[in-house]
Image (cartoon, rainbow, N blue to C red):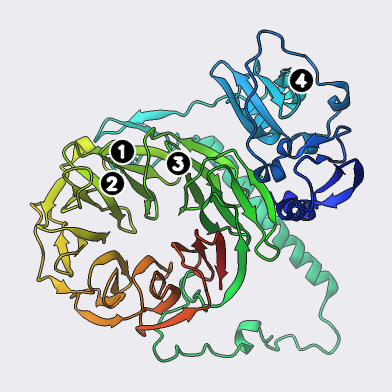
Amino acid sequence: MRALVAQNLEFFVSDQGKSRGPVRLDVVRRELSRGEMSHDALLRMEGCKRFLPGAAWDPISDLFPSPSPPDPPDGDILEALPRDLAKLDPQVRDKMLWFVEDPDGVMGPVAGGFVARGLITGRIPMTAAVSLVSVPGWVRATAVFPAALESETAIRARPLQTFPCPYCVEPVIVGSATCLHCGEPVNIGEPPIGLKRGLLLGALGFLLVLAPLVASVVSLRAEGPSPGAQADAPVASAASTASPAAPPSAGEPAGAGKSTRAGHRLAGEVAAKIDVAADAEAALLLPHGHVAVARRSALDVVDPKSGVVVTSSREASPVRAIERVGSALYALGPTRIAALDAESLRVTRWIEPRVPVTSLAVSQKLAAGASTADRSVIVFEAHHHVEIARFRLLDDIPSAVAIDPAGGLSVAAVSEGYGTLPNAIVVFTPSRAPGAQAVRRLAMGEAIGAVAARSADALVALRGSSRLVRVAVGDGSLLAPSGPARETCSDPAFVRAAEGAVIVGCRAGHAIALHDGGSLEKKKGIDLGGPVIALEVSPDGGQALVATGAPAPGVFVVDVAAAGSRRVAVTDEVSSVHYDGDGSAATAFAPRTRRVWVLR
């Protein structure tokens, strides 16, 4: 994708009998959006001799109505493209949209790059046929994408060696130290390499380290001391001349900055404002500074400085939410999840729960999401991107799900029927198989607004009494409230556990309530002028980003330690906020105005 970012895409345009070009992609999109260019205009790129309608080009297809798929071929499949399309440059071909016909039927339109990867990886069979949008007729896919044939005999599936777990008898990959199903240590690594081979490799490594040292000593002796230099004069190093480290400032905890995640805070300034498509559902910052916009029809990558869509992919569409899970991004679709590489936004693995999954609760190694249709909580492993457990609740319907940072505890708010408010919680260990543990349940007696999970307890915010309750879960016995319930703000809707504090976001009264992390005593309430619509805590736990709704919509940065807030200059009503990986930037998504705000 970085190559696409650096590449300045250009089109030749034929509109109303007049031809011009080359015209940059951003200019084409702007003219089409403003009506300065007719939607009947034809376009082509360098490397393609034929002018095609705009709906046939992936970078601008979102500005046109979606084309209807052609009828499946009746055995008449061409072995080559028409003459004016026969010699397509691969980079141009990958930006065209194609329909694909295989034994499962006709799918599409999809970008040529998607078809090429599908043929190479085997997800699309070599016998498939493709049809270019706006060009009638079906062509053999391998004739259009010949590179797939070159790798057909080079790629082989490599079976993984496994052994049964001694605790739950589930298969464990050789080399794993822990069973993914039950979480127990198995202490079986890779097979030994043998004594002789080990000694040989050790000797080789020693020689590789020793050779440069011997060469440097010989070189120094050959050169001798420089004239006038004192042999025993001490040489001042950069470490000895550096100024001593400044002590932590007042209000800053000792040791801050030692962690790689500490010290990254949001200043509360607007860095960019981006207009997005009408079908946008969510937005998230990417590691290289661009913004990923999830749409029902595609996944866009937008340059925040210019607001131009750098690239657009339908590989993971439709997407209704994006979540950061470990080093990857999860694009949530109607019944499946695409695990995306955070740098390139390519799909690295498909997860097939086959039921709708709500937004994920994420820990360091696991993620958990609720499925109301399946009456279950589904757990995903964040390194291999696989479903490892499904906790079916049968008599309960899960809604909000929380998981502690280490992934040792998960809690879900559940209700007894569709359309009813959750009034109970279930608690379980997400890393263990459902059959190897008892899922414990506790009725709270009133409606639940939000839940949170810590290593040894669950936090439950009750809507009716506006109280915060701790439930101890570490001893494995029957669940019961631990300690007295603490008063919080009215109508709680969010609970977040931070370092030494608990943050509650509410629909009424003081919009934010800050509680002590140990006693849960309410330390301060912050009135932000409106109900909390979205709340997220920074990665280091020292800051929160809050979006409020009418009558005073706004976005606020809350300092957890100082119990202070600062309003950000966002003028739209925001529905969701997301920090980036280190907490130095964030996005705020406003669906009504179809706008994404980038904050620094």
Residue 433 visible from this viewpoint: no
| Residue 83 percent location from the top left of the image | 88, 22
Q: Quadrant of the C terminus?
A: bottom right
Nearest the viewer among 424 and 483 is 424
Q: Residue at x 46, y 71 (%)?
A: 259
Q: Earlier in the sequence, mark 4 or mark 3?
A: 4
Q: Mark 3 sits on what residue?
A: 385
**Mark 2 or 1 closer to N-term?**
1
Q: CA distance from mark 4 to mark 3?
A: 34 Å
Mark 4 = which residue?
143
Amino acid on which the number 1 mark rests in the picture: Ala
Q: Are marks 4 and 2 in contact (CB under 8 Å)?
A: no
Upstream in the sequence, badge 1 or badge 4? Answer: 4
Q: Report whether 481 appears left or right of 452.
A: left
Report the Cα–Cα distance between label 2 and label 1.
Answer: 7 Å
Q: Residue shown at 50%/66% (left/top)?
A: 582
Disc 1 vs disc 3: Cβ atoms closer than 8 Å?
no
Q: Dot 2 lies on which element?
A: loop
Q: From the viewer's perspective, is residue 491 above or below residue 447?
A: below
Name the amino acid type tagged 2.
Answer: Pro
Counting residues from the N terminus, which is met first, the one under dot 4 or under dot 2? 4
The numbered mark, 3 or 2, whose residue comes first in the sequence reads 3
Q: Which residue is mark 1?
A: 389
Above or below 263: residue 133:
above
Q: Which residue is mark 2?
A: 430
Label 2 close to label 1 by CB (< 8 Å): yes
Disc 3 + disc 2, Cβ < 8 Å: no
Disc on res. 121: none
Q: Is residue 124 left or right of residue 146?
A: left
Quarter-wise, where is residue 154 in the image? Answer: top right
